[in-house]
Amino acid sequence: MVFSLADSSVHGILLDIEGTISPIDFVYRVLFPFARRHLNAYLKANATSEELSRDLSLLREEYQKDVAEKLEPPEWVEKPFEAQIESIQRYVVWLMDRDRKSTGLKSLQGKIWQQGYLRGELKSAVFPDVAPALERWKEKNIDVRIFSSGSVLAQKLLFAHTEYGDLTKFLRGFFDTTLGPKVSQQSYRRIAQEFHLPASEIVFVSDATPELDAAKNAGMQTLLCVRPGNPPQPDQLNRSAIRSFSDIVV
């Protein structure tokens, strides 16, 4: 379908990343394996850093909840240092195996990816219709922002290192799960406040219907993004859907 921003009185666009801007394969076949390969080295090299300490504090809280809920995570060993590093690595991998949308995990992954981008080992994959659409929307003064389970750092890195150049110049804001879960309508109410727009003047584009339902319940308009490689979604045929950002016209 074609979605007209003017006809729908939309002045803000909120975009998901995985399966909407970037192929799901890029996340699961490039980013996640890169984080796994470099996790141990990162933990050892940054053992005394305050940034890592904050991430580990969040992860330790999550680990304690997992233990309390009898999910049987790998044991978190406090000492000696080598055993602690190995146990943290096992727990982080355990979270990644479950695709946990964990704030501590996403923050840690973002820092590992940052090193990869800076060394030129990583290059972001985005769908070819993304860059032209972002440019068109900016020319029409549409406020475009991002909401992803990946950390804000990871989001900025992804947009700054694409084969189409640095796309961060087209974006006015980034939100991650420190603001709230992506399936909570309260998260979208908070985001609407950051836009300084009525929720009804914002359209949220995502490949996941639970997220779209939360945004809709907060008053936003929604579009299901159907991309190659995306898994089918519940009630997909009854949704307003697009297959390319070129379907969103000014």
Image (tube, rainbow, N blue to C red):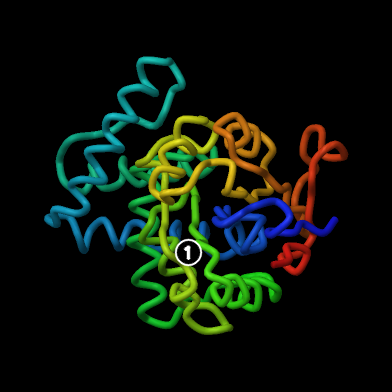
Q: Is residue 182 above or below residue 2?
A: above
Q: How many dots with numbers?
A: 1
Residue occupied by mark 1: 34
**Position of 120 relative to 101 (above/below):** below
Please name whichever residue, 43 or 250, is drawn nearer the observer in this view of the structure.
250
Kind of residue at badge 1: Phe
Which residue is at a point 69% across and 76% down the rendered structure image?
128
Quadrant occupied by the C terminus: bottom right
Q: Residue 216's spot in the image, x, y percent?
A: 63, 35
Q: Position of residue 90 (x, y in %)?
A: 39, 42
| Residue 97 placement, left or right of 157 | right
Say left or right for 144 vs 249.
left
Quadrant for the N terminus in the image? bottom right
Pointer 1 local density, CA inside 10 Å: few below 14, some 14–19, many at least 20: some
SS class, disc 1: helix
Camera-nearest residue between 138 and 89: 138
Q: Nearer the viewer, residue 17 or 117?
A: 17
The quadrant where residue 84 appears: top left
Describe residue 146's horizontal placement relative to residue 164 as left or right: left
The quarter holding residue 133 reads: bottom right
Q: Residue at x 85, y 36 (%)?
A: 238
* Residue 159 in the image, given as x and y percentages of width and height: 48, 71
Instruction: Give whichever of 149, 214 is nearer the camera.
Output: 214
